């Protein structure tokens, strides 16, 4: 007869409590070890940091210069280089002849311009203080043409213009300014600023200047040079030559300007030695088209 199978009965409660206490004890031991490891890590990290090589010093940037005032900073941006001082034009040579100018006078001319007849008046007014005014007015019938006026100073070298104006209705419409101190010529109708040559003239003063130059050195067959500025910003050296070797029979000296280019209208003038080589006739271009010609009618001192 087989023996009957037997199953273990439920363990006593005391044994269960003992088993749970053992598990908790092991967990506490493991947790304590991890805590000790975590506490030890900062100490090892500090030790490694001290063993690392020292840091390389970094050069600090130099302190920035103090800020410039706004106007000065803007000037330096617009003009990064200092301006180059102007070079003075060569002075007149000591042995240059002194130029003698005529006394105050009003010169009346017959005018031929654009195929029409008219009249012109040239008024010359040198002052005792060394200043002068020179004015040319023209008229064809009842129509007044633009007037020309030259203002400046006189001296041993002749005329030194300071301002030339082309006038309409009594008002300056176009002008040239001669800055003797800064050695510059400026124009109202052009942005050009040109160096001022020694003895430079405007479109009216050259009449008298050339007369004084010829009177000072009336060399037969000679040449006379003068710089002349125009209202549109041009500055050219005009060279005049005597057409005749000398005045025939005590008459006028005929001069002609060398051509300035293929379309130059040309300038001719006749100087009278008996009147201090004053221009008694002047022609520019063709008086029947766009040019003009004036011929002395009488003189009032």
Image (cartoon, grey):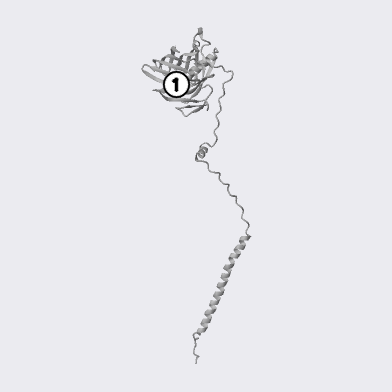
Identity of the residue furthest to the front in this view:
128
Q: Nearer the viewer, residue 73 or 238?
A: 73
Taking the image as shown, residue 106 lies to the left or right of residue 199, namely: left
Taking the image as shown, residue 57 lies to the left or right of residue 141, namely: right
Looking at the picture, how far across and down is residue 71, in whole percent? 50, 39
* Residue 115 against residue 45 in the figure, above or below: above
- Around disc 1, counting alpha carbons within 10 Å, would you say few (fewer than 14), some (14 to 19), or many (20 or more)? many
Count every numbered label the image shows and give the total: 1
* Residue 9 against residue 180 in the figure, above or below: below
Query: What residue does disc 1 label?
Result: 149
Image point (40%, 20%), residue name: 145
Looking at the picture, how far across and down is residue 50, in whole percent? 62, 60
Looking at the picture, how far across and down is residue 243, in whole percent? 51, 13
| Residue 287 visible from this viewpoint | no
Looking at the picture, how far across and down is residue 106, in whole percent? 44, 15
Quadrant where the C terminus sits is top left
Image point (60%, 62%), residue name: 46
| Residue 123 visible from this viewpoint | yes
Image point (42%, 23%), residue name: 167
* Residue 131 against residue 7 in the figure, above or below: above
SS for tag 1?
strand
Q: Nearer the viewer, residue 35 or 109?
A: 109
């Amino acid at each position: 007869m087989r023996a009957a199978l037997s199953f273990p009965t439920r363990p006593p409660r005391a044994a269960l409590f003992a088993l749970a206490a053992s598990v908790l004890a092991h967990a506490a031991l493991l947790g304590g070890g991890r805590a000790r490891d975590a506490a030890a890590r900062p100490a090892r990290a500090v030790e490694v940091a001290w063993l690392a090589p020292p840091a390389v010093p970094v050069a600090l940037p130099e302190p920035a210069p103090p800020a410039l005032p706004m106007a000065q900073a803007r000037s330096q941006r617009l003009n990064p280089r200092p301006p180059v001082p102007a070079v003075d034009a060569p002075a007149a040579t000591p042995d240059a002849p002194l130029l003698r100018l005529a006394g105050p006078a009003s010169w009346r001319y017959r005018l031929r311009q654009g195929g029409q007849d008219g009249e012109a008046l040239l008024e010359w007014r040198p002052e005792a203080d060394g200043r002068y005014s020179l004015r040319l007015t023209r008229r064809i019938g009842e129509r007044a043409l633009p007037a020309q006026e030259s203002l400046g100073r006189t001296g041993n070298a002749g005329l030194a213009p300071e301002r030339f104006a082309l006038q309409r209705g009594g008002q300056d419409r176009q002008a040239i300014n001669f800055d003797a101190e800064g050695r510059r010529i400026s124009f109202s109708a052009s942005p050009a600023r040109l160096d001022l040559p020694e003895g430079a003239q405007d479109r009216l003063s050259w009449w008298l200047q050339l007369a004084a130059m010829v009177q000072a050195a009336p060399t037969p067959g000679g040449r006379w040079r003068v710089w002349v500025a125009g209202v549109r910003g041009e500055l050219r050296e005009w060279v005049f030559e005597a057409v005749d070797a000398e005045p025939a029979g005590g008459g006028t000296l005929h001069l002609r300007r060398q051509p300035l280019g293929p379309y130059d209208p040309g300038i001719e003038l006749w100087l009278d030695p008996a009147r201090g080589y004053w221009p008694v006739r002047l022609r520019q271009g063709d008086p029947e088209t766009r040019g003009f010609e004036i011929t002395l009618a009488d003189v009032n001192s």
